[in-house]
């Protein structure tokens, strides 16, 4: 019997992929409409971003924007909250509203045949909410309970304490977006009505993505519904300042005696998506440093030392500037050693990065993009994010093009700028017995908080 000789087939590079390009329209009320037809995505995704920055909430009403958005479907001039819920359930409509730094965001998932009903429902809730006293009081109680849960959760507690450690107390980011227990408890239906009265279509964007082959009148439906919403007649002012505190380079340790793991949260200034280095450079850096178990941080702290299940690194852009964030948990008994090792990794100069790890990280970000953006909701979310940042729809494709030719020198230069900037702010949630050891690592004074 003769042996068969087989040869390995040559694997070709995947074809260049581009982010879907939407059709753009302007609705009668000034809303910008972006429409993406995605064959096979039979559940349509609608997203809307309306400018109403939380930084302009009156003092003492922090959290009113978020609560106002959550109360939009708790009763309108035509339907009670129960009736609205019944309409949504009968037609398979899932929708909700929330708030971010820049304003209110709405989201809806609906099948094509019920798109018109879904649009009418969202428009009604946006145009005619009544903010019933009883419903507002109930949601206030729920929000206060949520805040208590957030404070009890070590991971969330660390991120909340980071705001107070990093940001200037005079600026809105110092206070949690959803408010404090004190500010939320003080909210009334009148506060929410006043906040809603400032909501305007001016400067807003709507995205509709999915298989539109069976709804050729989709644009007309959006025009007839959301395009008819009048809202306030003036556009909201841009977000307020987000200054770094003069004392941000320090350590805050939230005391949780006996906690089995210590939660770590580190941050320092980072880029926004307009960075001259290209946003793809920082996507690559995030993957290289802390994007997987094979990244530099986990290779040492998880695989070699066994201190953690995983610590992640990321860059979080704002309207202007952003944050470099490192977060995760470590074994309590390894807290000081883990922080020491982590700081050593984060002090790595860019010249130590290798061509192999840079190329593997860049390729992972680029080659997984078709999967990340393979659904209607992912495309709609990205488009609304770009619109909120004032970025063109070509941004994702431009980032992918940059990744293809990204050099190690460019990544190294970008990282050295981060390293050479203001120092780390660090929050730990864990046993206070580690305060002295952490204080000896050179990050600044350690403040122990109850």
Image (tube, rainbow, N blue to C red):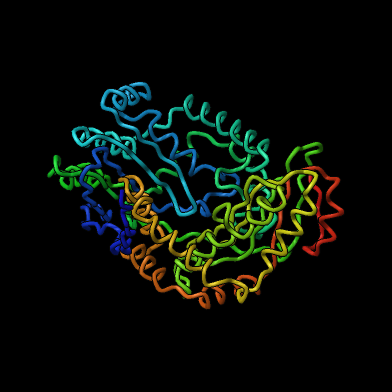
Examine the image and state in which quarter residue 340 appears.
Answer: bottom right
Q: Quadrant of residue 266?
A: bottom right
Residue at 73% from the left image edge and 41% from the top image edge:
261
Q: Is residue 246 left or right of residue 138?
A: right
Residue 381 percent coordinates (x, y): 37, 49
Q: Which residue occupies 81% across, 38% down?
A: 257
In the rendered view, does 249 fall on the left or right side of 390? right
**Can you give x and y, in whole percent of width and height, for residue 177 in the image?**
55, 47
Of residue 126 and residue 397, the one placed in the foreground of this image is 397
Residue drawn 78% across and 39% down? 256
Residue 169 showing in the rendered view? no
Instruction: Report the residue at 56% width, 33% height from top.
Output: 143
**Closer to us: 14 or 101:** 14
447 sits left or right of 26 in the view = right
**x and y percent of residue 103 in the render?**
44, 51
Image height of 422 relative to 21, above or below: below
């Amino acid at each position: 019997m003769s042996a068969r000789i087989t040869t390995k087939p040559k694997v070709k590079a995947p074809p260049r992929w581009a982010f879907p390009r939407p059709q753009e329209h302007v609705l009668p009320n000034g809303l910008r409409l972006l429409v993406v037809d995605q064959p096979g995505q039979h559940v349509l995704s609608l997203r809307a971003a309306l400018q109403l920055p939380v930084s302009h909430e009156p003092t003492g009403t922090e959290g009113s924007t978020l609560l106002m958005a959550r109360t939009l479907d708790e009763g309108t001039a035509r339907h009670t909250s129960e009736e609205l819920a019944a309409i949504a359930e009968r037609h398979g409509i899932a929708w909700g509203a929330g708030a971010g730094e820049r304003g209110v965001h709405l989201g809806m998932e609906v099948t094509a045949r019920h798109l018109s009903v879904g649009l009418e429902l969202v428009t009604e809730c946006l145009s005619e909410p009544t903010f019933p006293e009883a419903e507002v009081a109930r949601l206030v109680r729920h929000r206060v309970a949520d805040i208590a849960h957030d404070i009890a959760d070590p991971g969330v507690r660390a991120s909340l304490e980071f705001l107070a450690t990093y940001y200037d107390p005079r600026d809105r980011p110092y206070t949690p977006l959803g408010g404090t227990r004190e500010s939320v408890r003080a909210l009334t239906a009148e506060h929410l009505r006043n906040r809603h009265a400032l909501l305007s279509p001016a400067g807003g964007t709507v995205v509709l993505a999915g298989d539109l082959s069976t709804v050729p009148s989709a644009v007309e439906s959006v025009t007839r519904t959301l395009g008819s919403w009048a809202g306030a007649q003036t556009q909201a002012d841009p977000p307020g300042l987000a200054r770094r505190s003069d004392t941000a380079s320090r350590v805050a340790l939230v005391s949780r005696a006996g906690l089995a793991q210590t939660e770590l949260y580190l941050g320092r200034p980072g880029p926004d998506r307009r960075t001259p280095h290209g946003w793809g450079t920082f996507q690559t850096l995030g993957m290289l440093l802390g994007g997987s178990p094979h990244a530099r941080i986990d290779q040492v702290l998880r695989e070699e030392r066994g201190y953690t299940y995983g610590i992640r690194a990321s860059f979080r852009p704002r309207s202007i500037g952003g944050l470099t964030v490192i977060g995760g948990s470590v074994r309590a008994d390894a807290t000081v050693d883990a922080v020491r090792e982590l700081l050593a990794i984060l002090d790595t100069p860019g010249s130590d990065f290798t061509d192999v790890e840079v190329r593997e990280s860049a390729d992972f970000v680029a080659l997984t993009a078709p999967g990340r953006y393979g659904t209607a909701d992912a495309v709609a979310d990205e488009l609304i994010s770009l619109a909120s940042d004032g970025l063109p729809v070509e941004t994702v494709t431009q980032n992918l093009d940059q990744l293809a030719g990204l050099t190690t020198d460019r990544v190294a230069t970008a990282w050295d700028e981060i390293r050479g900037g203001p120092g780390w702010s660090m929050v730990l949630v864990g046993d206070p017995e580690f305060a002295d050891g952490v204080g000896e690592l050179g990050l600044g004074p350690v403040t122990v908080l109850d």
